[in-house]
Amino acid sequence: MKSKEWMESANCSTADPEMFFPDQNSRWGLEKAQRICAECSVVAECLDYAQQYPDLLGIWGGLSQNQRARKRTDNRKAVRSHNEWALDQPLREILG
Ligand code: SF4
């Protein structure tokens, strides 16, 4: 992975890397890392980056791999819903 400029400001750069790869069943482990992410000034950049690479393991942008997958699905649904609504607009006006 090529390092990005924002990574230099990452809160996790001085933390134990193991903390960001908690056991899937460890809610406590996940929350511990998320507390560090919550205070991170580059959380948005980190999440944007991770969302480009769905296979990334561990916690990025305060979310686990499963949470990021759900967020991508929700975002796709929202875009699809908006596009369907937008495509409907001219028809509504014509049929008005
Ligand atoms: S959001 Fe979390 S994982 Fe991402 S750089 Fe910040 S501390 Fe690290």
Image: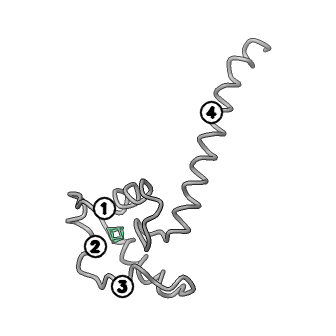
Give me the C-alpha separation between circle 4 and circle 3. Answer: 41 Å
Give me the C-alpha separation between circle 4 and circle 1. Answer: 30 Å
User: Please, what secondary structure does the residue beneath circle 4 have?
Assistant: helix
Q: Residue at x 26, y 69 (%)?
A: 10
The residue under label 1 is which amino acid type?
A: Val
Nearer to me, 9 or 1: 1
Q: In which quarter of the image is ligand 1?
A: bottom left
Which quadrant of the view contains residue 41? bottom left
Question: Mark on residue 18?
Answer: 3
Label 1 within 8 A of ligand 1 by Cβ: yes
Question: Mark 3 vs mark 2: which is more N-terminal?
Answer: 2
Residue topped by disc 1: 42
Q: Which residue is drawn at 23% across and 58% down?
A: 4
User: Please, what secondary structure does the residue beneath circle 1 have?
Assistant: loop
Give me the C-alpha separation between circle 2 and circle 1. Answer: 8 Å
Foreground disc of the pair 4, 1: 4
Within 10 Å of the Cα at label 3, are there few (<14), some (14-19), or many (20+) other Cα atoms? Answer: few
Question: Mark 4 vs mark 3: which is more N-terminal?
Answer: 3
Foreground disc of the pair 4, 3: 3
Residue 78: percent from left, percent from top? 61, 45
